[in-house]
Image: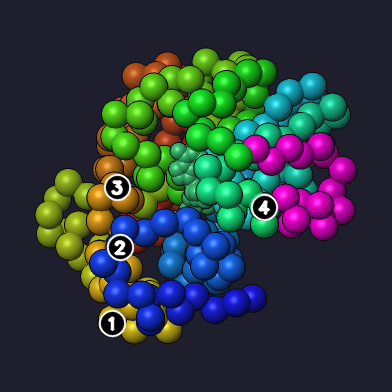
Amino acid sequence: MSEDRIYKSEDGGKPFRFNGNVARVFPDMLRRSIPGYTASIDAIAALARRHVQPGTRCSDLGCSLGAATLAMRRGIVAADSEIVAVDLAPAMVSRCREIVDDDSGTVPVSVMEADIRDVPITNASMVVMNYTLQFLPLESREPLIRQIREGLVDGGILVLSEKVAHSDREIDELMIELYHDFKRSNDYSELEIARKRTALENVLVPETVEDHLCRLNDAGFSHCDVWMKHLNFVSVLAIR
Ligand code: GEK
C-alpha cells in the first residue's frame, strides 16, 4: 500500500482535490485519517447481509476506490441484486473499476463516473454515503437526502458516515485536538496536519450530528440514529 505523504511536499495552498496523486495513496490516507473507517466498512458488509432485499439495487455514492461497494458485495445474500458505485473523480473511477474487476465477488457492480446529485436512485434497498456528503455544497444536501429517501424501497437503509462539528465550542475544539492526536499517532507530522487542514477548508464542510438527524427525519426516514462515533467522525443509520 503506497504511503500518504502528499502534504510533505504540497503546501496546502491549493484546495484539496481527488486527483491521481490522492487515488494512488488513498487506502493508506483513509486508514490513517478517519477514525472508525475500518469499522464503517465492516458494518456495511453486515448491514448488506441483513437489509439488501432480493431484486433490488444498492448504491455507493462517492465510492472512491470501492471499499464500501466490495463490502456490500461480500455481505449480500439476497438474490438478483446489483450495486451501482458512483464517483465524480476520474482517477478514482478508473482505479475503482480495476479493483472491482480483480475482485471475485459475483454480485453485478457497475461503476459510474458522475455527480451523485445527477444519478437517479430507484428500487434501492441500501444506499451508502461513506464520508461523501461532507464534500457537497450545503444547499445540495437536503435535496439529495430526499432523493435517496424516495429511491429506497420500504425497509431500505441509508448508511451515512461523516466528519462532524459540535455545537459546544469547547467540545468542538477538544475533538479537533484529539483528532490531531489520532493523526500524530498515525505518523502524520505537525506540518502535514496543518497543510491538509488548510487544503480542506471550504472543501469539506462538517455539520453537527443534530443537523444530520434533523435532515433525515425531515426527509421522512422512519428511524434514524448514530451507530458509531469516534472523535469527530460518525456513522448514522436511517431506515425508510
Ligand atoms: C470509502 N466512500 O472508501 N459526486 C460524486 N462523487 C463525489 C462528489 C459528487 N458530487 N463529491 C465528492 N465525491 C469512500 C470514501 S471519499 C472520503 C469517500 C474522503 C467523491 C470524491 O471524488 C471522493 O472519491 C469521495 O466522494 C469522498 O468508503 O476522502 O474523506
Q: Secondary structure at mark 3?
A: loop
The residue under label 3 is: 206
Instruction: Point out residue 77 in the picture as x, y percentages from the top left corner.
Output: 82, 37
CA distance for labels 4 and 3: 28 Å
Question: Which residue position is annotated with label 2?
Answer: 14
Extent of the magenta region: 97-112
Q: Amino acid at mark 3?
A: Pro
Q: Quadrant of residue 128?
A: top right
Q: Residues within 10 Å of mark 3 (few under 14, many from 20)?
A: some
Amino acid type, residue under disc 2 in the picture? Lys
Whichever of labels 4 and 1 marks the residue nearer the N terminus, that label is 4
**Disc 4 to disc 1, C-alpha distance:** 32 Å
**Above or below — where is 234 with respect to 186?**
above
Which labelled disc corresponds to residue 190? 1
Task: Check the picture and name the quadrant holding the N terminus.
Answer: bottom right
Compared with 155, 62 (above or below) is: below
Q: Is mark 3 within 8 Å of ligand 1?
A: no
Q: For numbered disc 2, what is the local secondary structure?
A: loop
Tell me: residue 87, above or below residue 238.
Answer: below
Please name the residue shown 47% across and 28% down the image. Answer: 117
Quadrant of res 49: top right
Which residue is identified by label 4? 94
